[in-house]
Image (cartoon, rainbow, N blue to C red):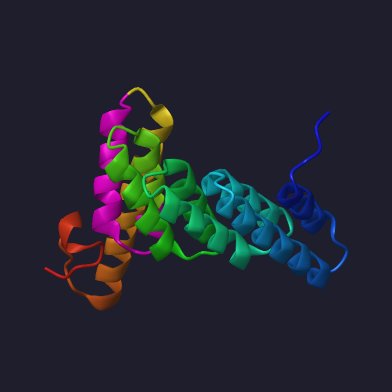
Amino acid sequence: MAALPLYLALAEAARQAGSPEESRAALDSAKNEIQEAMRRGRDPYPLYMDLADSARQAGDRERELAALSAALEIRPGSTRTLARLAGTYREQRNFDRAALYLNKIAGINPDSAQAYLQLAAAEEARYQFAAADRAYARAVALAPQNAGYRQRYEAFKARVERNRSTNSREQGVPCNNNPERGALSPV
């Protein structure tokens, strides 16, 4: 069995480190090794993705995001990297950033129902109901046989309608039923 490259060994040390300081030191060393490997002509993309994996496993989201961003600069059209960034931001409840990266995935792969479903969820979480409605509709149009997608879309529409009705009753103002104007737009 061949020995692991040094950056992978350091990344593994970061995963197993006993303290946050040891973990950061190992990740710093791994990053330096990656930069040295790049100077020797190695493709940096997989190195940065490995560093992102190690940072994630070490619980260092800041370094994970930095490594993923570096990987994305190298391969801007990488849906794998875009999805990892979107997922990490979604975990942090930063739905604006998650939606940004999911929109990029949908632009790169416009026939991906799953990309549109994830985009719809992010748009809904950031209260962009018109954008969520468009993304849910696109997901269902791309995968009409997927009952789960249809159920999620119908549940979304029911939540929007419930919000409209609640807002209308509380304010005594009739609400527009047009999702393009937003879920709670007065007439």
**Compared to 83, does 29 lie above or below?**
below
* Residue ID at (55%, 61%): 65
Q: Residue at x 27, y 62 (%)?
A: 164
The reply, left or right, for residue 36 in relation to residue 179 is right
Q: Where does the magenta region start and end? A: 122-144
Q: Main secondary structure of the magenta part?
A: helix
Question: Which quadrant would residue 64 be assigned to in this image?
Answer: bottom right
- Left or right, 27 with respect to 35, comes to right
Foreground residue among 80 and 156? 80
The residue lying furthest to the bottom in this view is 171
At a point 74% along the width and 58% down the height, the residue shown is 58
The x, y position of residue 141, in whole percent, is 25, 31
Number of numbered discs present? 0
Give the x, y percent position of residue 98.
43, 58
Percent x, y for residue 150? 35, 34
Residue 183 visible (yes or no) = yes
Q: Is residue 44 above or below residue 17?
A: above
* Residue at far front of view: 40
Q: Nearer the viewer, residue 89 or 6?
A: 6
Q: Residue furthest left?
A: 187
Question: In the rendered view of the protein, which quadrant contains the N terminus?
Answer: top right
Residue 146 rendering spot, x and y as whole percentages: 39, 26
Of 52 and 86, the residue lying toward us: 52
